[in-house]
Image (cartoon, rainbow, N blue to C red):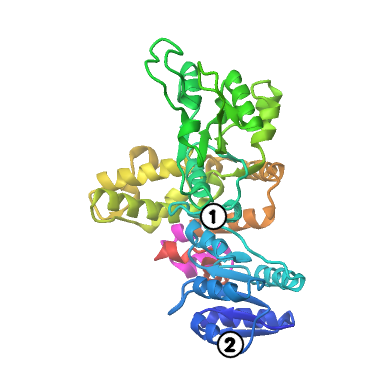
Amino acid sequence: MKPVWIIDDDRSIRWVLEKSLARADIEFKSFATADDALRALSLDLPQVVLSDIRMPGSSGLDFLQTLHQHHPLIPVIIMTAYSDLESAVSAFQGGAFEYLPKPFDVNHAVDLIRRALEQSRRKSAGAGEAAVAADILGHAPAMQEVFRAIGRLSQSHATVLINGESGTGKELVARALHRHSPRSGKPFIAINTAAIPKDLLESELFGHERGAFTGAAATRHGRFEQAEGGTLFLDEIGDMPSELQTRLLRVLSDGNFYRVGGHQPIKANVRIITATHQNLEERVKDGLFREDLFHRLNVIRLRLPPLRERREDIPLLAKYFLQKSARELMVDQKQFGEETLQHLSLQDFPGNVRQLENLCHWLTVMTPSQVVEIADLPPEWRDSVSASTTTGDWKAALAEQVAQALQRGDEGVMDVFASQFERTMILQALHHTNGRRIEAAILLGIGRNTLTRKIQELGLDEQEA
């Protein structure tokens, strides 16, 4: 069997992977740049490639593209320290076997390499696909799963149902699915079915003929016709009136619809993506949503986690939204103080990402200083803390969160909650000691080196900078 190629300009990353592969009795070869690896392709071929994205010279994606032009069956695992959807999906778009965000667990990386080796032996291609939206960001495992799903769905025409609370970014995900799909050159039309009066929604969706009702002075094309060849995004589908559920089911079943007042069927060539914050299974049981329509829509389901389930992403998103607001308003960008980021990380954000973005926009406009401190936050944010941090019975709160995760069918629950627990403990200790690591380590009962390692593993060093 040929060796595994490791491509990374970071010597420490190469060293860790080399030691781990040696212990696993897996042959390897290391390269400091993608250009070195490209030159080596003329002499030898790898069994599997593990490559960073951003390096001096050619990028990991450049190497991936060149390799797959001539050897499409060789699996490539892409590593990156940039935890955004762009990086994740660009990897899948290039045909990567898997995407591995840094910092990563070495044992997980070795397991991933073993899977890639097994696939390579079976000679089956490990290609993924694409999708992108710059402001869908996240280190959290739950968001990484969303990134992977978007990448793999990008070349599909399948109907997708997106579940998530208000403000979690459901429309952003729908646009990402469209933007890098085979329908990307055609329109993306979005409509919030809960925001339009029941009497107008039918005409809004399907259009109407002239004279169909009082005030219909001309023929009007509805959203289905406007989205012809492209994607129609139906937000808050759970609130759609029952009679329109029947009409939508008919369109999904036979691909035709009629304008209001019309008699000629119109062919609909549209991909349907729907979203809701509601539990559609419960609405089906309550007789509020058609079961047959639910099964038509529930071909592929994506769940977007609320912000309180991925608190580790709050600093990343907050910094991004401050930058975005400054760019839009054409003003100097403000920075968050360390304590402010720690304070925000403890909030529940019932409005989720949208609420955080609105807060950052307010801070850009209203904060006089360049460094945002806790005192600069709006009054309702200064002293507020999340319910999970104030409850007397935190074990019961934890048990409830774990039960919900298990009920959803989440995987790796132990790792997810253990990571969140460690992150919270370390952030609070550093906050209490004003960033003094030695003192924080003593209070936590761990060694300073252990604390430093965990800070790096959890990505907390960026928050301290």
- Mark 1 residue type: Thr
- Mark 2 residue type: Ser
Residue drawn at 63 percent across, 68 percent down: 105
- The quadrant the N terminus occupies is bottom right
Which disc is residue 424 wearing? 1
Give the farthest residue toward the bottom. 43
- The quadrant the C terminus occupies is bottom left
Q: Position of residue 16 (x, y in %)?
A: 60, 79
Above or below residue 288? Residue 27 is: below
Left or right position of 146 against 431: right
Left or right position of 432 against 289: left
Residue nearer the viewer, 389 or 76: 76
Would you identify the image quadrant in which residue 158 lies?
top right
Residue nearer the viewer, 38 or 351: 38
Q: Secondary structure at mark 1?
A: helix
Indicate which disc, 2 or 1, sits on the residue closer to the N terminus: 2
Which disc is residue 111 wearing? none
- Does residue 442 show up magenta in the picture? yes
**Magenta region, mostly helix, strand or loop?**
helix
Q: Position of residue 43 (x, y in %)?
A: 61, 90
Q: Secondary structure at mark 2?
A: loop
Count neighbours of disc 2 (C-alpha within 10 A) and say few if under 14, some if 14 to 19, many if 20 or more.
few
Above or below residue 250? Residue 362 is: below
Residue drawn at 55 percent across, 61 percent down: 93
Above or below residue 161? Residue 90 is: below
Magenta extent: 429-446
Q: Which residue is mark 2?
A: 42
Left or right position of 359 against 152: left
Residue drawn at 43 percent across, 61 percent down: 463
